[in-house]
Amino acid sequence: MTNEKLVTKWLEENTTGLSWTRVGNDTPAVKLDRLYINRSEAYEIRDFILRYYKECKLKHKAENYAITYKKIKSYKASEKVKSDEMLEYLSGLLQK
């Protein structure tokens, strides 16, 4: 299974309240260069996780997705956040 499918499957099975704006099998292509991350849109979270794991060389597994998802949702939860800011924040946590 590809990393894209692993992340998508994990989000589908372990989150609630995310918007899946596509119908049926219409899965959008991964887009890694979004200016902002919409944390209510499942596909945007998927894309961000894929970028983050690739850039930080993290292992794709359910335990890691759970930790990452919690951090994505909690960082400046009530604010609009740029993808690069979120990436910098999460990368910084890895170095501590």
Image (cartoon, grey):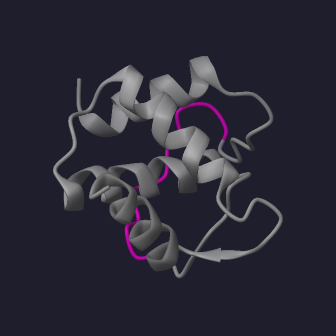
- Residue 58: percent from the left, percent from the top? 22, 43
Q: Nearer the viewer, residue 3 or 67?
A: 67
Residue at 50 percent of width and 29 percent of height: 66
* Residues shaded magenta: 23-34
User: Does any portion of residue 12 appear in the rendered image?
Assistant: yes
**So how many labels did they put on this image?**
0
- Residue 56: percent from the left, percent from the top? 22, 57
- Residue 21: percent from the left, percent from the top? 71, 47
Q: Nearer the viewer, residue 62 or 18?
A: 62
- 42 vs 92, left or right, is right
Task: Identify the residue at the far left of this view.
Answer: 57
Instruction: Answer whether residue 8 is magenta in the image.
Output: no
2 over 28 or under it: above or below = above
Instruction: Answer whether residue 33 is magenta in the image.
Output: yes
Residue at 67 percent of width and 38 percent of height: 23
Dividing the picture into quadrants, the one containing residue 16 is top right
Residue at 34 percent of width and 50 percent of height: 50
47 over 82 or under it: above or below = above
Image quadrant holding the C terminus, namely bottom left
Q: Nearer the viewer, residue 95 or 50?
A: 95
Image quadrant holding the N terminus, namely top left
Q: Main structural element of the magenta stretch: helix, strand or loop?
A: loop
Dividing the picture into quadrants, the one containing residue 37 is bottom right
- 17 vs 92, left or right, is right
